[in-house]
Image: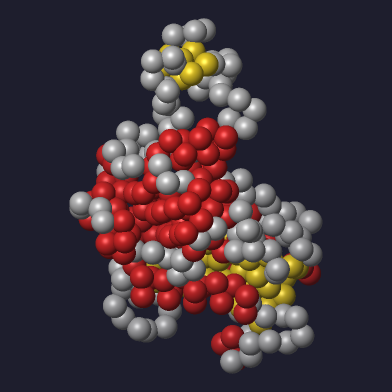
């Protein structure tokens, strides 16, 4: 899918609505309140009516598109641009490209697409896992954690999925929680650097220490056989290029949602249906109000 395809296939809001309807209700339109089959309103083709619970609704009701005044054609283009941009797309760029009236509209639009990307199933990772921590934001270039930087913890299955988290610190208990929530108990091996928290974190997470392999970064050793953390580090550097080059500044408050966006795109980089898959998430994800976003 590229911009020309989108303009050809979805030139009007009606065409966009047809696609969203198929993605939201592949087996026919159902009432979001009582799950009954429903029919289109005779008078207003964009609305459905449920007799069972006397409820009138549109395909975008109660989804990430809820209450948006933007034409769906613009939503579709914004979604494509965000899907295609490996290092991300800033709200400024979206505003210019779509000719949106205000930065605020573009910013809210981007955040809603990101919120849908965050609402995905995250199965437990197994096989060979790399785990690492890094720091983003702030001004200083010192090593370690300066006070003005945020902690990002990354977990990646080799040749598989990536997970990125905005963590409050790098203490063993914090790292252990991310392992428990993301790594399967029958993992083959977890590769980390020699950061002091890992042995204790891995033990607390219930993974036997024989499954933990360490690479001695502090002694400037980066690869021994298949022991390395290069694939998680390459994901970190892609994210950091996005922060520097595209978003310029990511506030601590919204860091987690940028991390979700990057992992979503990264994990689907070989998926030829990425655009439709993203739309499907958007039309099944729950509402994100401006109030909630800025609270
Ligand atoms: Zn109903």
Left-right relation of 276 to 79:
right
Quarter holding the C terminus is top left
Quarter holding the N terminus is bottom right
Which residue sits at x=52%, y=7%? 52
Vertical placement of residue 171 versus 181, above or below: below
Question: Of all residues shown, which one is farthest toward the left?
Answer: 102
Image coords of residue 279 (percent x, y): 51, 45
Which residue sits at x=58%, y=30%? 25
Left-right relation of 291 to 222:
left
Asked which quadrant contains residue 222, the reply is bottom right
Which residue sits at x=62%, y=79%? 230
Image coords of residue 290 (percent x, y): 29, 41
Asked which quadrant contains residue 139, the reply is bottom left
Counting the numbered discs, the total is 0
Asked which quadrant contains residue 141, the reply is bottom left
Which residue sits at x=49%, y=8%? 51
**Residue closer to the observer: 22 or 32:** 22
Vertical placement of residue 88 versus 240, above or below: above
**Residue closer to the observer: 186 or 202:** 186
Question: Of all residues shown, which one is farthest toward the front?
Answer: 8
**Residue closer to the observer: 225 or 66:** 66
Image coords of residue 236 (percent x, y): 51, 73
């Amino acid at each position: 899918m590229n911009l020309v395809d989108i303009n050809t296939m979805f030139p009007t809001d009606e065409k966009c609505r047809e696609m969203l309807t198929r993605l939201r209700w592949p087996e026919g339109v159902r009432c979001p309140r009582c799950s009954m089959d429903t029919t289109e309103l005779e008078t207003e083709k964009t609305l459905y009516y449920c007799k069972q619970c006397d409820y009138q609704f549109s395909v975008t009701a109660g989804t990430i598109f809820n209450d948006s005044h933007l034409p769906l054609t613009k939503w579709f283009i914004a979604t494509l641009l965000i899907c295609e941009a490996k290092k991300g797309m800033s709200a400024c760029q979206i505003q210019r490209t779509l000719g949106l009236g205000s930065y605020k509209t573009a910013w809210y639009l981007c955040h809603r697409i990101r919120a849908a990307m965050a609402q995905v199933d995250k199965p437990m990772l197994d096989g060979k896992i790399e785990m690492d921590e890094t720091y983003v934001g702030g001004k200083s270039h010192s090593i370690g954690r300066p006070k003005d930087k945020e902690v990002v913890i990354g977990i990646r299955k080799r040749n598989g999925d990536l997970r990125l988290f905005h963590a409050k610190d790098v203490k063993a208990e914090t790292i252990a929680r991310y392992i428990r929530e993301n790594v399967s108990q029958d993992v083959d091996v977890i590769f980390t650097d020699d950061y002091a928290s890992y042995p204790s974190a891995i033990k607390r997470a219930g993974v036997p220490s024989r499954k933990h392999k360490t690479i001695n970064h502090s002694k400037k050793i980066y690869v021994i056989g298949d022991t390395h953390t290069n694939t998680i580090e390459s994901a970190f550097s892609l994210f950091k290029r996005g922060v520097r080059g595209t978003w310029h500044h990511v506030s601590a408050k919204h860091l987690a949602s940028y991390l979700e966006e990057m992992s979503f795109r990264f994990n689907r980089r070989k998926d030829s249906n990425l655009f439709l898959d993203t739309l499907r998430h958007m039309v099944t994800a729950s509402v994100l109000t401006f109030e909630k976003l800025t609270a």
